Amino acid sequence: MAYLSSRSYRRAALAVRCSPLTSYLFERLRVQSVPLLAIAGRPGLQSGYTRCERSVVQAEDDLVWLIQVGVLRREVDGQGITDSFRLTPLGQAVVSGVDWRQPVTWWARLEHWAIRRLRWPG
C-alpha cells in the first residue's frame, strides 16, 4: 500500500492488535460483512469474535474506532448504511500483515490508549 503513510499503517495495526476483537473476526471480515449484533454480547463471545463479552454500545465504540483509523467500513446496501462491517483495503493489508501469535506489550497498549483516548497523533 504505497499510498499510505507508515504512520497510518502502524496506527491501524496497533488498533487491530489492541482491540478486544479476535483474529478470527478479522479473518471473517476479510471475506464477508458481519453485523454488530453478531459481535456484541454473548453471541460475539460464543462465536469467537471477542475476547470478552462486550455490550452493544462497547462493541459499536470499538468498531467505530476501527473505522476512524481506516481498518473497517460500514456495509452499504440499496437502502443505505447497515449495521454490518467489512475490512477496508488498509484493513486487508493490516490483517494479513499482523503476527497474531506475538503478544501485545504493555507499552503498545499504553500507546494505543493515548492515541485513542487522548487523540495523541501516534
Image (cartoon, rainbow, N blue to C red):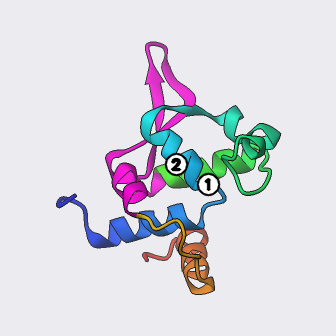
Q: Residue furthest front?
A: 101
Q: Is residue 9 above or below residue 33?
A: below
Q: Which residue is mark 1?
A: 22
Residue carrying label 2: 26
- 31 falls in the magenta region: no
Q: Is residue 122 above or below residue 82?
A: below
Q: Position of residue 77 (x, y in %)?
A: 45, 18
Residue 119 versus residue 82: which sits nearer the camera? 82
At horizontal 54% and vertical 25% (from top left) the residue drawn is: 82
Question: Residue 75 in magenta?
Answer: yes
Residue 109's mark?
none
User: Where residue 90 sits: x, y (%)?
Assistant: 34, 53
Is there CB contact under 8 Å for labels 2 and 1? yes
In the image, what residue type sits under mark 1?
A: Thr
Residue, x 77% and y 50% (percent of image)? 54
Q: Which amino acid lies under the numbered mark 2 shown in the image of this protein?
A: Phe
Q: Secondary structure at mark 2?
A: helix
For the record, the magenta segment spans 68-97
Rendering coords of residue 13 (x, y %)? 44, 65
Name the outermost residue toward the bottom.
107
Q: SS of the residue at dot 1?
A: loop
When the figure is inspected, residue 26 is found, relative to residue 19, above or below; the finding is above
37 relative position to 91: left or right: right
Specify the quadrant that holds the C terminus: bottom left
Which residue is painted at 24% across and 61% down in the image? 4
